[in-house]
Image (cartoon, rainbow, N blue to C red):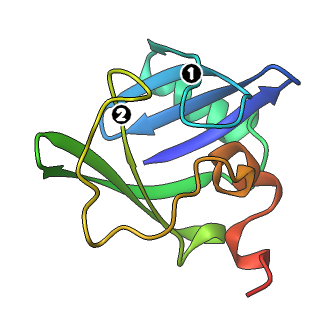
Amino acid sequence: MRQGYLGEAESASIRVRVAGSEAWLNIKSATLGIERLEYEYPIPVTDAEEMLDRLCRRPLIEKTRYRVPWHGHTWEVDVFEGENAGLVVAEIELGAPDEPFVKPPWTGEEVSDDRRYYNVCLVRHPYREWAV
């Protein structure tokens, strides 16, 4: 999966993503926390590739996403590459912020309120630059 950011404002970011033979344009609110507004629209892969190559801020986000079923939910586990190599993030989409779920034993600390982990922030401050 490759994705890049066309722009960001105080209230939202605009992203283009290519995953295999599909591509999307995405607008996501810039609020902290587990509940964020998100709108996603399919676009032609050729358009998305051109946007990634010519319009998006560098570095691009490169990652492999795994979908892992766990106790009735599907976790998305992103293993980052490139400038963010070494970072692994797991997330779950819930129907409501207070929906109960079982946390897998292989997950780490909760980082939903830490902007550094947002993909748009990983473009400005890649994981490899973080102080360990």
Amino acid type at mark 2: Glu
Q: Earlier in the sequence, mark 2 or mark 1?
A: 1
Q: Is residue 126 left or right of residue 73?
A: right
Q: Quadrant of residue 34?
A: top right
Q: Quadrant of residue 15?
A: top right
Q: Is residue 63 left or right of residue 51?
A: left
Q: Position of residue 7 (x, y in %)?
A: 80, 27
Mark 2 or 1: in front is 2
Q: Is residue 102 left or right of residue 78?
A: left
Q: Position of residue 65 (x, y in %)?
A: 34, 53
| Residue at the spot 63% in from the left edge and 37% down from the top edge | 33
Q: Position of residue 20 (x, y in %)?
A: 31, 40
The residue singled out by tag 1 in the image is 26
Classify the position of the C terminus by image quarter. Answer: bottom right
| Residue at the spot 26% in from the left edge and 43% down from the top edge | 101
**Foreground of the two, 118 or 111:** 111
| Residue at the spot 66% in from the left edge and 69% down from the top edge | 83
Q: Position of residue 23 (x, y in %)?
A: 42, 27
Label 1: which secondary element: strand
Mark 2, Cα crowd under 10 Å, few <14 / some 14-19 / many 20+, is few
Name the residue furthest right. 10
Q: Are marks 2 and 1 in contact (CB under 8 Å)?
A: no
Mark 1, Cα crowd under 10 Å, few <14 / some 14-19 / many 20+, is some
Image: 110 above or below 131: above
The residue singled out by tag 2 in the image is 93
**Foreground of the two, 61 or 121:** 121
Amino acid type at mark 1: Asn
Q: Is residue 15 left or right of residue 49?
A: right
Q: Which mark is residue 35?
A: none
Label 2: which secondary element: loop
Name the residue furthest bottom. 132
Q: Give me the C-alpha separation between circle 2 and circle 1.
A: 16 Å
